[in-house]
């Protein structure tokens, strides 16, 4: 974990590569302070962790996991809102979970046809590898870049949310490149 403004390393840990991200999502919560911003990938997204972040009066941005239910104020499911949207961007307040108990903001940008097809091919490959059926909801999400946050819209517009999250995503890309170039998977698969 790094303090982004001054680049200071706050915490590091070495974990088993097979340990689920959701379990690791709890590790940094003791370090979160008021007004901090936690950038999360969807693998780390849990209701417990975002509630813990919010209880410290801090903020978060994440991509929306496809297995999470999301609804607008009239209980319309997100996949229906995306399907009906005629625009390339969607900025709305949504509620997460089956019981619609967790409010947040959604910032969605339609992807190009090539990006959408690439995401769908990946989803189908993953489903096949796990012996599962490809969920239609996931396929509808694949056509969009979907971010969710509790940052107030009065202070942070959609462009700022995309910029902040792109910083987190660049870390992911660098880490992936480092793992591939060092052939780390060989040592981990033994």
Image (spheres, rainbow, N blue to C red):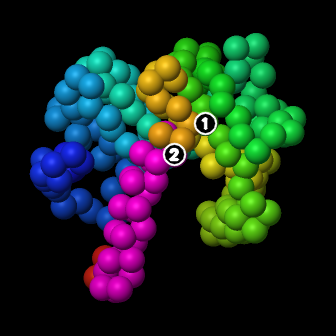
The answer to the question of whether label 2 and label 1 lie on touching residues, with beta carbons closer than 8 A, is yes
Q: Residue at x 56, y 36 (%)?
A: 158
- Figure quadrant of residue 115: bottom right
Q: Is residue 186 visible?
A: no
Mark 2, secondary structure of its residue? helix
> Could you say where residue 140 lies in the image, as x and y percent from the top left?
77, 47
Establish if 146 lies above or below 74.
Answer: below
Residue identifier under label 2? 162
Q: Please state the extent of the stretch shown in magenta in the rendering.
A: 161-184
Q: Residue at x 49, y 20 (%)?
A: 154
Residue 139 vs residue 59, the one in the foreground? 59
Residue 117 vs residue 87, the one in the foreground? 87
Establish if 141 lies above or below 111.
Answer: above
Residue identifier under label 1? 107
> Could you say where residue 33 lies in the image, as x and y percent from the top left?
20, 27
Residue 170 forms part of the magenta stretch: yes
Q: Residue at x 70, y 21 (%)?
A: 72
> Could you say where residue 150 lies in the image, as x and y percent from the top left?
46, 25
């Amino acid at each position: 974990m790094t303090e982004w403004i001054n680049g200071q390393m706050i915490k590091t840990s070495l974990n088993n590569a097979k340990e689920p991200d959701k379990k690791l999502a709890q590790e940094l919560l003791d370090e979160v302070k008021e007004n901090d911003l936690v950038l999360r990938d969807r693998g780390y997204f849990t209701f417990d962790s975002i509630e813990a972040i919010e209880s410290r009066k801090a903020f978060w941005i994440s991509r929306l996991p496809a297995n999470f239910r999301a609804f607008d104020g009239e209980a319309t499911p997100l996949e229906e809102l995306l399907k009906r949207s005629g625009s390339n961007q969607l900025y709305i307040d949504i509620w997460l979970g089956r019981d619609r108990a967790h409010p947040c903001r959604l910032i969605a940008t339609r992807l190009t046809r090539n990006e959408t097809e690439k995401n769908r091919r990946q989803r189908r490959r993953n489903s096949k590898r796990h012996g599962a059926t490809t969920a239609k909801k996931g396929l509808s999400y694949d056509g969009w870049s979907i971010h969710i946050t509790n940052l107030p819209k009065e202070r942070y517009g959609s462009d700022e949310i995309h910029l902040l999250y792109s910083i987190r995503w660049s870390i992911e890309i660098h880490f992936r490149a480092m793992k591939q170039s060092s052939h780390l998977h060989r040592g981990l698969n033994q």
